[in-house]
Image (spheres, grey):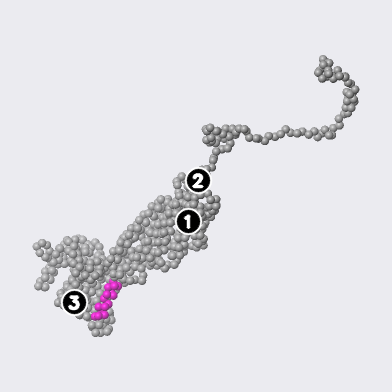
Amino acid sequence: MTETKSNDSESNANTQQQSGTKNDSSKGPESIYTVPLLKLIKEAQQQHGLRHGDYQRYRTYCSSRLHRLRKVLHFPQGDRKGFKKREVTLDNLKDEKFIYLPLIQAERAWGYAMQLKQESNTEPRKKFHLIARLRKAVSHTIHLEYVCQSPLCDARTKLEAQAYSAWMQGTLCFELQEWKQASEKLVLSQTIYEKLASALNEDEQILYKQRVEELNPNLRYCAYNIGDSSAQQDLLNMRSKGGKSELDVLIAQTREKQAASLLEVTWRGRTVPVRLEKIRVFLLAFQALDSSLGKANDFDAKLSGYETILLDCKEAIQSLKEDLAAVAKTKVDVQSPQLGSQQYLLSYLTFLRATLTIDRNLVMVEVFKKNFAAYQSGESKKVAKPQEGVKLYEAMVQLSGELQVLQGIETDKKFQNDLELLVKVFKAFRCYYMALTCQGNRQWAEALALYQRAETYINQTEGKKLGDSEFTKYSRVGQDLVHLRSLVNSGKCAAHAQNILGVEDINAAMSGLSVRSKKSLSLRLDEFVEDVSLTTATPNVIKLPPTMVPVPCKPLFFDLALNHISFPSLAENMENKKSTGAGITGFVKGLWGWGGKK
């Protein structure tokens, strides 16, 4: 019966091969398949029962998966009339999902065998059924290895299939207590997994190294049962018999494909692989950012470029976080003293997002300073408040703080020292604009305290420079501290003076002052002054009585020459006048004007 079934399957396979050759003779291979078998197996096992040792659930999952695959690939085994076995051949390998069929069949048989192994502790008769299931699994793995020898499969897939087939055969021989053959197969599987681990990136190495460690106890037990203490070392030397030259060629091809398909990023002396497409797109755009910003003609174009690259960065970080979350559900925890490569890549992307945001904020600060200076000088009517500067520098302080606690660089002293210096620079500017805000609100004491705090930060950063290559581009910000010091000193003096005066509300104090002119209208006829009092009942037209005005007095004349002039003597005339008297009648005539000459 076994021979008849095998002959029938061979004839069906030949028929399918011939039909596949006729149909696809004109089509060449479109791409090379890369199927990480061990990774697929481990993820499926962890997600569907084997995390808790539930082999029945895993076997059920494998059956459902097979049904779905055959339906998707349009590869059923028979029709409504009856069952017709169909095997995957080299000719009908049109999709990499065809490789999943023998793989999942082998896993289903192996899972059933492990379930029977658990039950055989109480029912010894089930051990025969266990062996039969393992033989079935071995036949599927051998067929899988044969299918993977297709030129459509790359070197890694071929190595994975060989290692998986050798491991399954070694497991069967181990259950049959054929210790020598079990050792040979397990050593071959362990050798291939070791080579694969050396050829892959550090993120994928963990899974293969774990499989290598899982095989060590079985190998030691086999060596013990063989009875020869040097048996295990002899088996390790059998690697040269298993086609070492062919193995090395496949390993070399795998390394070449990894180098060609994976983009690596080196940051602070460590190289990590990049697998996700969104991250690659972002990194390529980031490399071209400097050239695109150099072509920008104004601030708006630069800000638009930063917004675009930041959006790509956020999408890349989100995709990487989702990938890490998915891996964490299925990945076996392996303690490593070094941060994982993908976690380190996440730190690098977070660093880029923070620095790009700081760069964008610095451009916005330049725009703000320009508008603020124009508004203060009266050249522009567009309102620019110091609160905008506070928000921008506050965001940069927070971003710098996030960089200080970034995973993977906590012990980098040079990086941390430059970050601390950069934080103080940003805090100095933030305190200055906060002081301007308080000064605008007439909070003179608070403004004075903030000016003093800004001066403290400036003194702490004086004479220090950014030495790390990641932050040398911010040296210009440190150079602006010289100008900031002068602004802080002038603002501090103004706030101190206002604080001493004790005038809390200048507007209220000024509103109480009268701007009415004290001059009356008669005194300022040649001037225009808006005087509301002119229309009231008491207009200020003229002041009555008029005010006393000082006037000059009449001059006094002194005859200084009189003392130096000699007058003629009048003595003779005076005597004649005395001798001529007219009596009383003469006096009367002279008094009343009578008797005078006409």
Q: Are marks 3 and 2 in contact (CB under 8 Å)?
A: no
Residue 440, above or below 13: above
Task: Give the number of the disc on residue 431.
Answer: 1
Residue type marked 2: Asn
Callout 1: SS: helix
Q: What residue span does the magenta drawing correspond to? A: 208-222
Q: Residue at x 58, y 34 (%)?
A: 520
**Residue designated by label 2:** 507
Q: CA distance from mark 1 to mark 3?
A: 75 Å
Q: Residue at x 41, y 55 (%)?
A: 360
- From the image, tell me which residue sits under label 3: 121
Whether residue 266 sits left or right of residue 247 in the image: it is: right
Q: Residues within 10 Å of mark 2 (few under 14, many from 20)?
A: few
The reply, left or right, for residue 540 in relation to residue 96 is: right
Q: Nearer the viewer, residue 484 or 253?
A: 484
Where disc 2 sits, the SS reads helix
* Magenta span contains residue 122: no
